[in-house]
Image: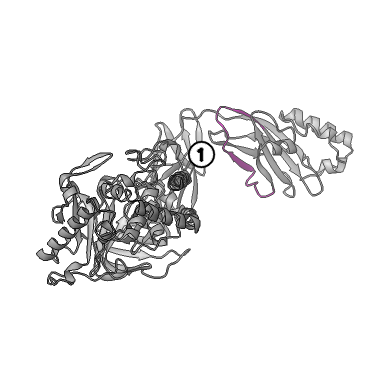
Amino acid sequence: MKKIISPLLILIILTSMFMFMFGLYSCSSNQNAPYSPVMLVFAVPDHANVSVRDIRIKGFTLDWTTLPDESYEYAIAASYNGNIENYETAKENGKIVLDFTSSFIVNGTYKVKNLLAGKEYDIKIFVQAKNIKPVEYLKTKAKLPFNDEAEITGVTINGNPAVYDKKDDSFTYHYLTAFEESSYAFTYELMRGCALYIGGAKVESKEVKLTPNEVLEVTVVNERTKAARDYTIYAGGVDNGIPIVIIDTNNKKVESKTKNVPAYMKIIDSADNPMGIGLYGGDIEIRGRGNSSFGMPKKGYNIEMENKCQILDMAPSRQWLIMANYTDKSLMRNYIAYEFARDLRMAFAPKMRFVDIIWNGKYIGNYVIGERVKIEEGRLDLPKLKKDMTDEYNITGSYVLEISCSDRLSGGEVKFNTQIFKKGQTTIWGRAEGDVIVIRQPGKDHLSPEAYEYIKNYFNEAEKALFGDDFKDPKKGYRKYFDTASFIDWYLINEVFKQVDADMRLSTFFYKPRGDDKIYMGPVWDFDLGGGNADYRSCDDPAGWYVRTGIWIARLFEDEAYVQEFKNRWNYIKNNGYFEVFFQRIDDTAKYIEKSAKMNFERWPTLGIYTWPNANEWWERTTYQSEVDYLKKWLKTRIAWMDKEINK
């Protein structure tokens, strides 16, 4: 750059000539600035020019015909409502779109984004050098048109829909690093009459190659109006910090909850956050799971292996589940409920681990893989009952039972009714016709007729004691049959979540150990519709008792001694930091799965969209964090209401 060394008068004359020749306003406020002439000279190039070369809907490009000295640093301010008289004013009012740097000049251009279409902007460039305060260097005006005439209407990358970000006009496809390929191809659809340009050259092919992690800049041009619009296309690998589960069914569909499909499963560790154990690789059998959830687009599955195997840090087993959490947009209600049960030292609470799943070569979202309710070492660790065990001692256990509804059963289950379930139990919500108690273990192949009669009669006797005249009597009443500590913890967790199925209707488990006269309640189960996530039965309202309307639970709360036992347990939990741990776990979990959640909602764009049975104001929860915040706020309000009622 040529340096100007003449006196101040000559400088002013040259500057005036420059302004006249190029129609620009350059250094208009410098005459009153407190600088020496020499310092001011360094801020003004001799043949500078700036124009708005390429107006587009998402920004504009500044173009210098002569580059200034690269030893200076530059800042750009843009505003359609003033407040950029000088650098300090522009900075104070948030109008600086690029702050001082010497590295932004590439081939004499700089792109400014995130400006509003239809607005006329004042553009100012400020310059500074060492020991010089910022001064105005050049200024011009630019109006961004409403440009809906040049548009990409859709992009797929390797056959997968790319995610469009309207803020940045970008199409992005994230793939898990375990599946990085050497190249990617994007195909595109354009608005009628438009063409795609890359590097100034028109693209004739409908398929364009991408290298992994390449940011490809493209321009769409309307060939009639010459309107132009910039887009970026990106295919990049990510490590979400959680394990990846690969499932290959050889493209066979899994459409049944009873018929298995052979498949292959492999678990790949995260490089960023390795677990280092339980990285299974081998054949499995897979089938659908869930009731209402199996009818949703993102489905859950049950899997079985030929032999017991460890998965991640969970105890070895042949049987596992994969849970989708489609309607639970926090993705964590089941996980935090089960961990809360573990905090309370319940005998068994299923372990769940977050994973990303690749299904037949395509990413299908964030899931949890975990333990099913089962008598087994490392789970519900009780002695198993076999069909030939019919003596007086062995026949007392062990049993796992579930309250369910006949229309949810596949037809092969062994079930029975107590007197209340036989006539249809009654809650404040009405009669639950068809409710039954299902014997989950032992299965029908290991359940003798004697064992069936024993457990059916035992439950009937327990229920008679609960609803008898002497039900409060410690020796004659329900305490003879029920382990009240397990009932209280099961109830407490479900009432905190106001779990919609926990009013003794569905997904309610009991177990009875061998040689023990007591029925235990648990494990807790199925919380994706809890925590304010159901818009029926008032379960989105954090106030009001719900689970205690179930007919057995309601009867227990008629006993003053049981009420006091529950109150003591509640206050112990409240006063010993359990709830603090509970809420910290929500924050920790949200941070742990944040990257995976982002990919999940790119694959399943349900944020801000009603997904049955989401609670009211679902339309305001448009980000993952807003769903986490809603869950925390709802649970805090719920716990505060319960505490006030319990201790009033």
Relative image position of residue 257 (x, y in whole percent): 20, 53
Q: Which amino acid does label 1 sit on?
A: Lys
- Residue 120 relative to residue 513: left or right: right
- Identify the residue at image location x=25%, y=49%: 506
Relative to 425, say whether 305 is above or below.
Answer: below
| Residue 205 visible in image | no
Q: In this view, does 546 lie above or below 52?
A: below
Q: Determine if the magenta segment contains residue 115.
A: yes
Residue 503, position as x, y percentages in the image = 29, 47
* 362 horizontally vs 462: left or right: right
- Total labels drawn: 1
The residue located at (35%, 49%) in the rendering is 528
Name the residue nearer the viewer: 400 or 260.
400
Instruction: Out of 65 and 435, give the one closest to the viewer.
Output: 435
Quadrant containing the N terminus is top right
Rate crowding at label 1 as few (under 14), some (14 to 19) or many (20 or more) other CA atoms within 10 Å. Answer: few
Q: Is residue 510 visible?
A: yes
- In the rendered image, the vertical position of residue 179 relative to residue 9, given as above or below: below
Give the colouring mode of the picture: one colour
Residue 405 is one of the magenta-drawn residues = no
Q: Position of residue 553 (x, y in %)?
A: 30, 50
Which residue in the protein does label 1 denote? 167
Q: Is residue 287 left or right of residue 333?
A: left
Name which residue lies at 33% across and 40% down: 613
- Give the secondary structure at mark 1: loop
Residue 381 in the image, given as x and y percentages of width and height: 29, 69
Taking the spot 48% from the left edge, 63% from the top edge, the residue there is 272
Quarter of the figure with residue 608:
top left
Instruction: Choose between 211 and 198: the one closer to the eye.
Output: 211
The magenta segment: 101-122
- Side of 446 relative to 546 (left or right): left
